[in-house]
Image (cartoon, rainbow, N blue to C red):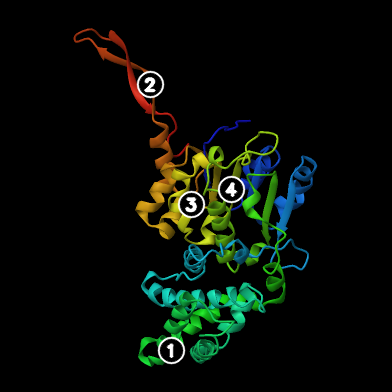
Amino acid sequence: FLASYGQQFVMLAAPPGTGKGVGAVIPNLLSYPDSMVVNDPKFENWEITSGFRAAAGHKVYRFSPERLETHRWNPLSAINRDPLYRLGEIRTIARVLFVSDNPKNQEWYNKAGNVFTAMLLYLMETPSMPFTLPQAYEIGSLGTGIGIWAQQIIELRSGGPNALSVETLRELNGVFEASKNKSSGWSTTVDIVRDVLSVYAEKTVAWAVSGDDIDLSKAREEKMTAYFSVTEGSLKKYGPLMNLFFTQAIRLNSKVIPEQGGHCADGTLRYKYQLALLMDELAIMGRIESMETAPALTRGAGLRFFLIFQGKDQIRDIYGEEAANAIMKAIHNEIVFAPGDIKLAEEYSRRLGNTTVRVHNQSLNRQKHEVGARGQTDSYSEQPRPLMLPQE
C-alpha cells in the first residue's frame, strides 16, 4: 500500500458506498502512530479500531451525544477566562453555532450570536451556575423574555460583591436595548437562539457536553484518539456540534509550534506528537471557518488533514469557489475513486496528463494502368494520448 509521511495532507472525494471506509479510513486508523481526531458516522471506526489503538498506547475516547455511554466533552471549558481573551473566544464559538443555511439571513444569526455571547459572559461570572451549553439553553428558552432577564441581571449585579464586569454589563445592556426595539426583529433573534441551542435540552446531549473527560488540547502532548461517533441518521442534526469539535481541535493545537512549546523533564519536546484530523463527511459539518486557512498555515504546528467528502461541488457550495479552491490547493495528495459524474472524470483525465504513443499509419494505393498492382506505404508517428480517458 501507499503511505504519505511528513507534513502532507490528503483528500478523498467519492460517492457513498464506494469503500471509503474500508479502503482509506480504517487502514489509517490501524496504522497512523500519533494522535487522531476522527468523525465516526455509524460507530464503525470505533468498533473496529479503538481496541487496537488502545493496545498501541493511546488514550481512546468516544464522544457520542446520542448515548449516556459516552466520554464527555464540554466545549466551554476550553475558553480562556482571562479578560484579555475570553470575549474573542466566546465569539468564536458563536460564529460556529450561529450560521444560517441561507447567507441572506446571516444578519439575524449574528444578532442571535450576540445574545449568546452575553449569556456566556454572565454564566462565566456566576459560579453558582454550570458553565455549559445546556445552561445557556435554559436562559435562551425564555424567548422574548430574555430582554427582561437581562434588565433584571443588570439591576441586581451592577454593584456589590457579586458585581459583573463592565464588559459583561455592556453586552447584557446590548441585549436589553435590542429587546426594546420591537421593529428590530427581536422575536426572530430569540427564536434563532432557542432553535440553535435546543439540541442541548435533550438529556443525552446535555450529559455529553457537561463534563471534561476529553481534553483536545492534549493531543500533541500524549497519544490520544478521539472519535465523534453518531448514527448515520443523526449526522445532520449533530453537524454544528461536529463543527465545534473539530474547530476546537484545530485551534487548541495550532496556537504554538512544537519548537516553541517547551520541553518535558526528560528533555523531549512537550508537543512531541502530530495530530491527524480525519474528517469524514466534511460537508455535514457546514462551513468550518478555521478550515479556510488551517491546511495552509498549520503545517508547522504538527497538524495533518485527511478530508473526505462526496464531491468537490459540495465543498464549493459551502465555502464558495475561491475559498474551496484554496482549501483543495493546500492538499498535497488526492485519493481518486471511480468518479460518478463525467465532469469529475474529465478533470481527473486532464490532471493525469498525456502519455506518448507510437501510431502506425498504413496506406494502400493502386497503380494506374496495372490491374491488381498495389503500392503500400507505412509510416510511424508519435502522438499524445491522455494517460486515462474520462470513460476509462
What percent of the width, then of the height, locates residue 345? 44, 42
Q: Earlier in the sequence, mark 4 or mark 1?
A: 1
Above-or-below relation of 43 to 86:
above
Q: Earlier in the sequence, mark 3 or mark 1?
A: 1
Above-or-below relation of 195 to 40:
below
What percent of the width, then of the height, locates residue 89? 50, 63
Of discs 3 and 2, which sits in the foreground? 3
Residue 179 disc label: 1
For label 2, the SS is strand
Residue 311 disc label: 3
Q: CA distance from mark 2 to mark 1?
A: 71 Å
Q: Residue at x 36, y 54 (%)?
A: 321
Q: Is residue 371 left or right of residue 93?
A: left
What percent of the width, then of the height, locates residue 279? 57, 51
- Res 39 seen here: no
Above-or-below relation of 103 to 248:
below
Q: Residue at x 41, y 59 (%)?
A: 317
Residue 356 disc label: 2
Q: Amino acid at mark 3?
A: Gly
Number of marks present in the image shown:
4
Residue 277 disc label: 4
Residue 234 disc label: none
Q: CA distance from mark 4 to mark 2?
A: 40 Å
